[in-house]
Image: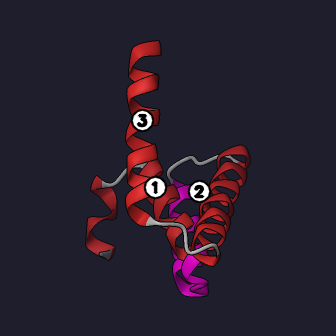
Amino acid sequence: MLLNIVSQSKYDKLMSLAVAANLKCPYCELFHKNVAHMMGASEEEFAETAFMASFTSRWSAMIHAQHYDYETFAKELQQVGEYLTKKA
């Protein structure tokens, strides 16, 4: 992992930071935030990453707590995709 950071982009590191935040791993958070910073990530990008990490985690918890049917969710997601494709 440490040897491969040169070939990764700032956005790879920001995605890794979002995952680390949801895992609540302070080592991974420190590593990925610092590398993203070295690659030029801005405070605005860090804020957006934190928001998306929390937003994704929050909706996952809400859907799980409701025991929402997976097949229904998949079908609805497909319908959303079809609708957006027509609008594009």
Q: Is residue 30 above or below residue 8?
A: below
Of the numbered discs in the image, which one, if any, rests on residue 73?
1
Amino acid on which disc 1 is placed: Phe
Amino acid on which disc 2 is placed: His
Q: Is residue 13 above or below residue 64?
A: above
Q: What residue is shown at x 33% (from left), y 75% (from top)?
A: 2
Q: Is residue 67 above or below residue 55?
A: below
Where residue 46 appears, as percent x and y from the top left, is 67, 54
Give the residue pinned by disc 3: 79
Q: Is residue 88 visible?
A: no
Front disc: 2 or 3:
3
Q: What residue is shown at x 73% (from left), y 49% (from top)?
A: 43
Crowd band around label 1 with a 10 angstrom C-alpha radius: few (<14), some (14–19), many (20+): few
Which quadrant of the rendered structure holds the N terminus?
Answer: bottom left
Q: Measure how far apart labels 2 and 3 are at the Cα level.
A: 39 Å
Amino acid on which disc 3 is placed: Gln
Where residue 17 appears, as percent x and y from the top left, is 54, 66
Of the numbered discs in the image, which one, if any, rests on residue 30?
none
Q: Do the residues under discs 3 and 1 have CB atoms within 8 angstroms? A: no
Q: Which stretch did the figure color magenta?
A: 22-38
Crowd band around label 2 with a 10 angstrom C-alpha radius: few (<14), some (14–19), many (20+): some
Dominant secondary structure of the magenta stretch? Answer: helix
Give the residue pinned by disc 2: 37
Q: Do the residues under discs 2 and 3 have CB atoms within 8 angstroms? A: no
In this rendering, position of residue 84 left or right of residue 18: left
Q: What residue is shown at x 50% (from left), y 70% (from top)?
A: 19
Where residue 32 appears, as percent x and y from the top left, is 51, 68
Q: Secondary structure at mark 1?
A: helix
Of the residues under marks 3 and 1, which one precedes in the sequence? 1
